[in-house]
Amino acid sequence: TGTILGGEWSDIRSWNNSQYSTPNPAHDAELTLNIEQPIGKNFFGYIDRNTVTITRLAIENATLDTKDRIEAIIARVQKSYMEFIYRKMALEIYEGIYEKAKSMNDVNETNFEIGLIEKAELLASNANLLTIETDVNLARNNMNRALENLKLLMNVEKNVIVEPIEVLDESEFDKNIEWCLQEAFECRRDYEKNKRNIKLFEIERACGQ
């Protein structure tokens, strides 16, 4: 209600050596109570309601910040997961290329032994096989690095085996750019937070804060 209660107590002690003063020492005690009710202050709980509203809006903004942090963590895990899938598929492709190159190199070695190709062609085939083998090793290292990053984000032990269940493929998206922009704008939490901040400013200004 905005009521202000106050209290004050005092005790004055007097003492002298006069024989005409009784009692000696003397005490003069005083107790004062004050009650103030400013007119219009928190009238019908106006300030209390605004305080509750401010607190509620602040909590909602804090909830949005928490959701943003949670979604950012999930997004990093998803991105790392898709990176692992991509690196795993790339390794499989390079391994397939290596197997074909190895088969071709075996054929070239046989052809060289029977004199169907020159030594320069055989050396070129060997060099190509070594180059592809290097690509396979690089692809394997990239996949292992992506896997370790994924385990780190997921807080998974190193000895745990992680196998993806999705594959990278093309899928049609039937939404246009206008729909995407509208949907993205409506889902922006910073926009909702700023709207609540405007309400907070208006309430605080109305309360004279």
Image (tube, rainbow, N blue to C red):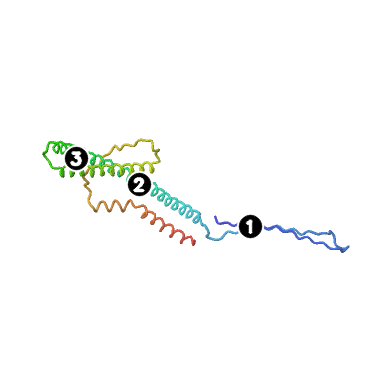
Kindly identify the residue that appears in the image at 72 percent across and 59 percent down: 10
Say which of marks 1 and 2 sits in front.
2
Q: Nearer the viewer, mark 3 or mark 2?
A: 3
Viewer-nearest of discs 3 and 1: 3
The crowd level at tag 3 (other Cα within 10 Å; few <14, some 14-19, many 20+) is: some
- Residue 111 lies, in percent from the top left, at 13, 37
Dot 1 lies on which element? strand
- Residue 173 vs residue 122, the one in the foreground: 122
Q: Earlier in the sequence, mark 1 or mark 2?
A: 1
- Kindly indicate whether the residue at mark 2 contacts the one at mark 3 (C-beta within 8 angstroms): no
What distance separates the C-alpha of mark 1 from that of mark 2? 58 Å
Left or right, residue 52 beside residue 129? right
Q: Nearer the viewer, residue 65 or 17?
A: 65
Residue 81 sits in quarter: top left
Disc 2 crowd rating (10 Å Cα; few below 14, some 14-19, many 20+) is some
Q: Earlier in the sequence, mark 3 or mark 2?
A: 2
Q: Position of residue 182 (x, y in %)?
A: 28, 53
- Identify the residue position indicated by label 3 in the image: 101
Q: Residue at x 85, y 60 (%)?
A: 22
Q: Answer few, some or many: residues within 10 Å of disc 1's Cα (few below 14, many 20 plus, some between 14 and 19).
A: few
> Which of the labelled discs sits on residue 76, or is there none?
2
Give the image location of residue 44, x and y in percent: 50, 55
Report the amino acid beneath label 3: Ala
What amino acid type should be assigned to the residue bearing mark 1? Gly
Q: CA distance from mark 3 to mark 2?
A: 37 Å
Can you identify the residue that label 1 sits on? 6
